[in-house]
Image (spheres, rainbow, N blue to C red):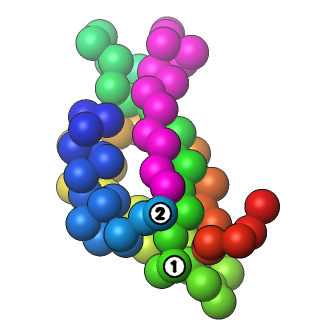
Amino acid sequence: MAERITNKLEQALSPERLNVIDESHQHHGHGGWREGGETHFRVDIVSEAFAGKSRLERHRLVNTALAQELAERVHALAIVARAPGER
C-alpha cells in the first residue's frame, strides 16, 4: 500500500520530496486497524502544486489523488503538505 500511495502521489503532484510512512503498528487494536496493517499512514510531501494553496486545499489534493486507497483500505492519513521553500 505504501508503494501504491507513493506512485499515486508522484503521478498526481510531481513532488520534490515525498515520504510515506506506514504507522499501522502504532494503532494496533484501535479503530480502523486490520490484521496485516497498511491502514494508517503519514505522508510528508513537498510539491510546487501546493504553492499559493491553503492547508485545506493541499489536503484535498492529496485526498483526491488517494481516493481509491482511502475507500478501500486506508483508515487514517496524516498529511504534511508544503510548497518548495516552506518549513
Residue 56 in percent (x, y) is at: 62, 74
Q: Residues within 10 Å of mark 2 (few under 14, many from 20)?
A: few
The C terminus: image quadrant: bottom right
Give the residue type that dot 2 points to: Glu
The reply to whether discs 1 and 2 touch (Cβ–Cβ < 8 Å) is yes
For label 1, the residue is: 48
Give the residue type that dot 1 points to: Glu
In the displayed structure, 45 sits above or below 57; it is: above
In the displayed structure, 69 sits above or below 9; it is: above
- Magenta-tinted stretch: 17-29
Magenta segment includes 1: no
Query: At 25% across and 38% down in the image, what residue appears?
Result: 3
Can residue 6 be seen by looking at this rendering? yes
For label 2, the residue is: 16
In the displayed structure, 40 sits above or below 17; it is: above
- Using the numbered discs, state the Cα–Cα distance from disc 1 to disc 2 in whole angstroms: 8 Å
Residue 67 in percent (x, y) is at: 29, 60
